[in-house]
Amino acid sequence: MPASALMNVMVAAVRKAGRSLARDFGEVEQLQVSIKGPANFVSAADHKAEDILFAELSRARHGYGFLMEERGLVEGPDKSHRWIVDPLDGTTNFLHGVPHFAISIGLERDGEMVAGVIYNPATNDLFTAEKGKGAFVNDRRLRVANRRALADCLVVTGIPHRGRPGHKRFLAECEAAMRETAGVRRLGSAALDLAWVAAGRFDAYWEHSIQAWDIAAGILMVREAGGIVTDLEGGTTMLDNGNILAANGAIQKHMIALLKSA
Ligand code: IPD
Ligand code: CA
Ligand code: CA
């Protein structure tokens, strides 16, 4: 399918910011051995990528608003459009030299997600989706998996770490998932977790208290690949409270029941 003008804008922005992140990722390996470690360097890399995305997207679409991880809310004169951006999702992976991280851009129009791009510059995997036009990875169409029994399903989640609440609840949910599924994974990038559900690699993804910029693009990606995205009650408050479940249609209800049983 020929790329739309909007997709061209989003892809150009992530490719440019991706080149900057990829260069900095190359440096990170060298810094692992230094006493201070790469933390400040990575924070600078994150901000640099966000600056590039902000400049590129502002230039291409005058007046759209932004919700960005580092800048927060930036209102624009155009009240119906808003970019929701995480310049570096998977920061801990990046910091440790693990090549699993991504830039995530979602576009919201009148409160509805209409376009999303998730790009991992370390692997060059480019995930794109537009409302009503399907989801793709590097031009190959994405479909969620069709597994129907939890016992066959590979599921992915986010584990709360130091400084985040919900450790006990997570352990109970994880135990339930361990009991019922073929395997549980934690890869460290919510945006890529969703993209990989869209790609049928994972059957489901869930997480608590996640931010809008982590999931905005991924929500559309999964839906356009034929999957279902809800909060953990089966409702639609994911972007408000950050509690999210993405799955193929056959197992979505089973996943909700499983997490509730925890
Ligand atoms: C994090 C990642 C991670 C998720 C965390 C997020 P960041 O984003 O998406 O997978 O479990 O909740 O904060 O900090 O790397 O942009
Ligand atoms: Ca993030
Ligand atoms: Ca981030």
Image (cartoon, rainbow, N blue to C red):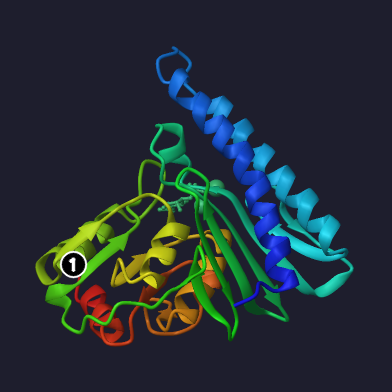
Query: What residue do we see at 16% from left, 82% from top?
Result: 149
Quarter that holds the C terminus: bottom left
Of residues 26 and 192, which is closer to you in this image?
A: 26
Q: Is any part of residue 204 visible from this angle?
A: yes
Relative to 252, residue 198 above or below: above
- Residue 111 position by quadrant: bottom right
Q: Secondary structure at mark 1?
A: helix
Ligand 1 closer than 8 Å to the CB at disc 1? no
Relative to 96, residue 117 above or below: below
Tell me where residue 119 appears, x and y as whole percent: 54, 55
Residue reaching furthest to the front: 2
Relative to 188, residue 209 above or below: below
Tell me where residue 143 appears, x and y as whole percent: 39, 78
Tell me where residue 256 appears, x and y as whole percent: 29, 80
* Number of numbered callouts drawn: 1
Quarter that holds the N terminus: bottom right
Tell me where residue 138 appears, x and y as whole percent: 50, 62
Of residues 173 and 60, which is closer to you in this image?
A: 60
Query: What residue do we see at 43% from left, 80% from top?
Result: 230
Relative to 3, residue 38 above or below: above
Q: Is residue 198 left or right of residue 221?
A: left
- Residue type indicated by callout 1: Ala
Residue at image mark 1:
177
Q: Is residue 135 left or right of residue 78?
A: left
Q: Is any part of residue 70 visible from this angle?
A: no
Query: What residue do we see at 44% from left, 12% from top?
Result: 35
Query: What residue do we see at 44% from left, 24% from top?
Result: 29
Of residues 172 and 62, which is closer to you in this image?
A: 62
